[in-house]
Amino acid sequence: MSQFKICAMSGSLRKNSFNTAALRAAQELAPAGVTIEIADLSDIPLYDEDLRHEGSFPDTVMRLRAQIAATDAVLFASPEYNYSVSGVLKNAIDWASRAPNQPFDGKAYAILGAAGGILGTSRGQWHLRQIMVGCNAYGVNNPQVYIGGAAQKFDASGRFTDEAGRALIGQLIEALVKLGTKLKS
Ligand SMILES: Cc1cc2nc3c(=O)[nH]c(=O)nc-3n(C[C@H](O)[C@H](O)[C@H](O)COP(=O)(O)O)c2cc1C
């Protein structure tokens, strides 16, 4: 198989974020030929239409847009904030979603999420799917990866230790590669 590139976006900027840690698990679990690069969202400014001039964007936004455009698919790790996606993630998606050359258009994406609560971001993930319809992207429907009770599933070094959850992340990446490959053909 030729190289398949995935841009990963975590909706949490926190150093010990469970969501970013889950993306690191995804990097470990990616099969040969699949690379997952985690985008840096920490320096993306708050959306301001005045910073967008005739197709030009702030440098950090240009970097993010180019990173998404250069990959075959997107993997989101979304915390659930008040039953929805975090502002960090929504803000980054909003910047990336503006014309011209909207990089999510027609692209495959998948979602995983980790939360303190037992529902493991399931409500927030539904909102994210709705947002991605607005971006004309195509989501992996199954498996669904909801990491509830996250504090018990990551060790002190941030390793995701839940074996069933790790297996699901592996399956999610497989499904994302399958969908992304189909969409490109
Ligand atoms: C503003 C805010 C709202 C939150 N709302 C929810 C929620 O609706 N559901 C939930 O399960 N956890 C909620 N939490 C707890 C998060 O799941 C928890 O902080 C989680 O660790 C965040 O992800 P991170 O570890 O990647 O930063 C909320 C946390 C914050 C800061």
Image: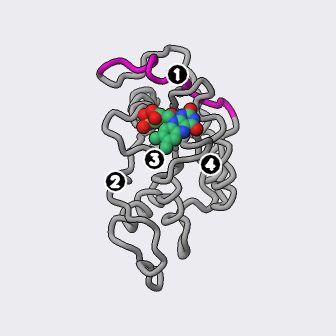
Residue type at tag 2: Ser
Q: Residue at x 34, y 53 (%)?
A: 42
Residue visible at 53% across and 63% down?
94
Q: How far apart are marks 2 and 1 (CA)?
A: 25 Å
Return the residue at label 4.
128
Say which of marks 2 and 3 sits in front. Answer: 2
Give the answer, above or below, for where 83 lies relative to 47.
above
Q: Is residue 152 left or right of residue 141?
A: left
Q: Which residue is drawn at 40% across and 37% down?
A: 20
Is residue 31 or residue 109 the one in the foreground? 109
Q: x and y percent of residue 115 in the render?
A: 52, 31
Labels 1 and 4: the sequence-earlier one: 4
Q: Which amino acid does label 3 sit on?
A: Met
* Residue type at numbered disc 1: Gly
Q: Residue 1 carries which label?
A: none
Q: How many marks?
A: 4
Q: Nearer the viewer, mark 4 or mark 3?
A: 4
Prevailing secondary structure class for the magenta stretch in the rendered image:
loop
- Numbered range of the magenta stretch: 142-156
Instruction: Write down the residue under mark 2.
Output: 42
Q: Name the residue under label 1.
A: 149
Residue 64: in magenta span? no
Looking at this rendering, what residue extends furthest in the bottom direction? 54
Measured in 3D between alpha carbons, the distance from the residue under mark 1 to the one under mark 4, in whole angstroms, is: 20 Å
Q: What element carries label 4?
A: helix
Say if 60 sits above or below 154 in the image. Answer: below
- The residue that disc 3 covers is 9
Q: Which circle's residue, 4 or 3, is located before the other in the chain?
A: 3
